[in-house]
Image (cartoon, rainbow, N blue to C red):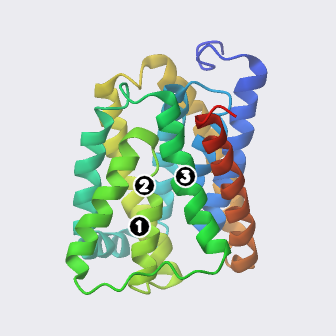
Amino acid sequence: MDYVMAGLSAPAFWAAMAITLCAGFVKGAVGFAMPMIMISAFSSFLPPELALAGLILPTLITNLSQAFRHGVQPAWRTTKTYHRILIATVIFIVISSLFVHVIPQRLFLLLLGVPITAFALLQLAGINLALKLEHRHRAEWLLGAVGGLYGGISGIWGPPLLVYLLSVKADKLETVRVQGVVFLIGAFVLFFAHLHSGVLTPATIAFSAALTIPAQIGQVAGTLIQDHLDQTRFRRWTQILLVLTGLNLARRAVGL
């Protein structure tokens, strides 16, 4: 048990498990935000590299079930349709993962806190984040690259993808499936990239594996109510949570 806890105290370990359970529930209900919730909350009491390592396997496992919830063929069609954003995300996850050790903790927190807060505040304000895509293929490469750059150092590459899906007016089922496929492939790349970077060690892998249990339980619970949930209201509360966690990250970054 001590090995699985990666050197954490029992309260810290069980707090991480509880946070992952809640994040998994949000993931199951709305299809996104699990890594953002986990990294934002984890960064309050875990070292940055352990916080990043902890979310990698839960992200991979939950996206596996999300991507293939409706079968292999729909997932494959989605992969072909969105291959440009996938390729760009993968390439830039690999590139940015090489710099995870050299980015100062305060800058790391600021790079997370400000975009997360801005993204959630814009949605809460009812501002349409959809872009006018005159060149759809160019937008896929660009937003995939932006997502990958953040993904390699933080485990989060969802917001640029969500902006793109809003812009192309993807429906609910397509949006959830696309997120699952993109996040799944990105999670595989993130896993292998951080095996190479040293973030994933036997101890941190064991810790991350333990977190897959509450992640899956939460996802199953969230998925069961997904079709009956008031999505607008739930997303609003999720966005409020993201604003608070993002502001907390930014506060810690500036030393307040």
Residue beneath the point at 28% across and 32% down? 98
SS for callout 2: loop
| Residue receiving disc 1 | 161
Along the polypeptide, which appears first: circle 1 or circle 3? Answer: 3
Q: Is residue 172 left or right of residue 256?
A: left
Q: CA distance from mark 1 to mark 3?
A: 17 Å
Which amino acid type is shown beneath numbered disc 2? Trp
| Of residues 202 and 224, the one drawn nearer to the viewer in this rendering | 202
Residue 229 visible to an observer of this rendering? no
Place of residue 217 in the rendered image (x, y in percent of width and height, measured from the top left): 68, 49
| Residue receiving disc 3 | 114
Q: Is residue 151 left or right of residue 65?
A: left
Q: How many marks?
A: 3
Q: Which numbered marker is on residue 157?
A: 2
Mark 2 vs 1: CB contact within 8 A: yes
SS for callout 3: helix
SS for callout 1: helix
**Residue 79 figure quarter:** bottom left
Q: Which numbered marker is on residue 173?
A: none
Question: Residue extending furthest right?
Answer: 11
Which amino acid type is shown beneath numbered disc 3? Val
| Of residues 211 and 169, the one drawn nearer to the viewer in this rendering | 169
For disc 1, the neighbor class at 10 Å (few under 14, some 14 to 19, many from 20) is: many
Q: CA distance from mark 2 to mark 1?
A: 7 Å
Residue mark closest to the camera, 2 vs 3: 3
| Of residues 19 and 65, the one drawn nearer to the viewer in this rendering | 19
Which amino acid type is shown beneath numbered disc 1? Leu
